[in-house]
Amino acid sequence: MSATPSTGNIVIAIDAMGGDHGPAEIVPALASVLAQRPDVRFLVFGHKDAIAGPLARHPALVSAVTVIHTEKTIESDEKPSAALRASKGTSMRMALEAVEEGQAMAAVSAGNTGALMALARIVYKTLPGIHRPAIASVMPGIKGETIMLDLGANVLVDAETLVQFAVLGAAFAQKQKKIQTPTVGLLNVGSEEIKGPEHIRAAAEILKRIEFPGTYYGFVEGDDIMKGTVDVIVADGYAGNIALKTAEGVGQLVKHYFTESFNSPLAKVGALIAYGSLKKFKRRMDPRLYNGGVFLGLNGLCVKSHGGADALAFSQAVLLAVRLARYGYIQQVIEDINNVVRQETFLNPESSE
Amino acid sequence: MSATPSTGNIVIAIDAMGGDHGPAEIVPALASVLAQRPDVRFLVFGHKDAIAGPLARHPALVSAVTVIHTEKTIESDEKPSAALRASKGTSMRMALEAVEEGQAMAAVSAGNTGALMALARIVYKTLPGIHRPAIASVMPGIKGETIMLDLGANVLVDAETLVQFAVLGAAFAQKQKKIQTPTVGLLNVGSEEIKGPEHIRAAAEILKRIEFPGTYYGFVEGDDIMKGTVDVIVADGYAGNIALKTAEGVGQLVKHYFTESFNSPLAKVGALIAYGSLKKFKRRMDPRLYNGGVFLGLNGLCVKSHGGADALAFSQAVLLAVRLARYGYIQQVIEDINNVVRQETFLNPESSE
């Protein structure tokens, strides 16, 4: 490494080669983050020739960035197993290793999700007391934002793993939403206690009984995600991923309907007059503002950006990483999980995996 | 029964007491259906005094309606088990019995979903060869409508049950979308064959191998529901219900954002000028046009309307019942299931339940 950023700053490791656009969108995203958070420094991993051009167009960024040249890149369509075998020296792996070695506080990548999760598990390792990592994200809602997990790191999981997700999510909400005791709901098909599959009902029984860093609210349904009924929604990765993708699909359908409906000359005049409101509506509907899935339960922070992210979207993923790094998310989780494991011995990984 | 409607017509049994609004919205809904489909006749079950007022305001409807007075109603918040015990003589049960006795071709109710499903199973019975009934609905999409099931009659189910849902859904799509070989996808967390929970992957293996009245497309994800990627999406009731409710929640969030954004005087002027387009957009976003969940796999047709349905929404549920009744959905399913059972003996309910 040619230079280390000055101490006292928050240092984020960036995989500059991941995603559809690479440094062309990622470098401007970093410039935007720096403008909002002048205390952030970046270790940028990628091919120096690909980074040089975009970086030259953002002179203010130069002093906040250390470029670490990498020859190899993991492709977005590579199978995780194949990507893993040839991962040494790739921009993705080196970004994670920088966190593991203490040079950076979090890594951000828009690359291959499966490969990133597999590598993060290998490089960071799972936190003591946690069975499986999960992916969490911030979702917009009528009453406020909701942290939701797991969005697809797993499929169906057992009740104990869901309880661990509740702890991971509650600690996330404490840092992200700055609230002491976030409310936590379990995603289910109805709010009555008798409803839903066995693993969800069993998780509810445990959450009612234990002390954990949130308040157990009960079952919530799909529409509660966007109502903002609770601060944290816990789901297995099967239900969570389907809910997330369905929400994305409805967003796309609305956009399609909107474009198709407002196509007459009169509509365009009306839209021009209502320009401010229309812009406000579009901004609130903009999925880029919610870009960033955080891998939780690992002994290191990693935020996965959407592969198609542009500069605005990627900057949101980086800001999420900055927030979690700054407020000591991992230390919090280690404490919380230890506390829960002490109460419930069967939540200890030794006894169940 | 005081009078039977004339033969040659499509007769629909209506539970006039179900839902939040009862006859006040249900009777105008029937008038609207009759205006579009003059060959439809209604057996309307409910308290004659509650029905008389709304009916007097729709004189054109009188000759198409036979009112069957009932004293008892199942409340929307009753537990299905309790509702079942006291169901004799209720408007909901009598509507179903009218179908079972051959007086009507389908029943429509906006009442208590759990009680309606429990009663429909008792009164109609499950079709031979079908393990469990499912709830299906028509979903809007960019490329066209998608039939989706199960939306919550079950939670997690086995692979054979998912295959039966595929047959039920394909037959529905043949009648609803008027296509000979509908494409059928399995809702999952990714499109690759190795992805997802065991029951979904096992169902895929069977669907690849058997002949059934659709073409197996492969796995689809949550956003494919609104893209219209396939004609039919098959899910267990756990994932299907969560997807449906999430979609409803996003719809409500969009409406909320829209109302909040267009609140300035200038926005109102713009909205007035773009009135036609705005109306078109709102109409396409209107969930009432997709009201109606069909109980599939039973030896009788029943459509569940949303409890909060107004006249427009309820009329859509009735029109759905009319379409399925008219095109002989149940006869089709019996043939299709027999054909599949002949190919795969383990799909026979005797061997697996």
Image: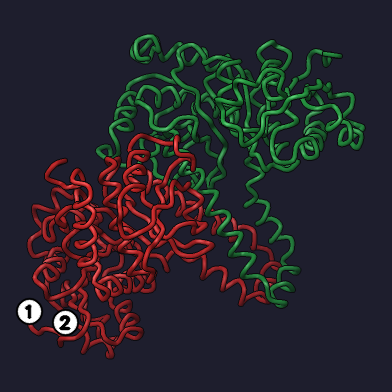
Chain colours: A green, B red
| Residue kind at label 2, given as amino acid type | Thr
Tell me where residue A342 sits by quadrant: top left
Q: Which residue is mark 1?
A: B1
Q: Residue A9: percent from the left, percent from the top?
A: 78, 18
Secondary structure of the residue carrying numbered label 1 = loop
A280 w.r.t. A181: above or below:
below
The C terminus of chain B sits in image quarter? top left
| Residue kind at label 1, given as amino acid type | Met
Using residue A13 as the reference point, say whether residue A202 is left or right of it.
left
Q: Residue B344: percent from the left, percent from the top?
A: 22, 47
Residue at (66% x, 44% y) in the render: A288
Residue at (16% x, 72% y) in the render: B45
Q: Residue B208: percent from the left, percent from the top?
A: 36, 47
Check disc 2: other Cα within 10 Å, few if <14, some if 14-19, many if 20+.
some
The answer to which of marks 2 and 1 sits earlier in the sequence is 1
Q: Are marks 2 and 1 in contact (CB under 8 Å)?
A: yes
Asked whether B244 or B186 is in front, the reply is B186
Using residue B298 as the reference point, say whether residue A343 is left or right of it.
right
The N terminus of chain B sits in image quarter? bottom left
Q: Which mark is residue B66?
A: 2
A339 w.r.t. A45: above or below:
above
Q: Which mark is residue A206?
A: none
- Is residue B17 in view from this perspective? no
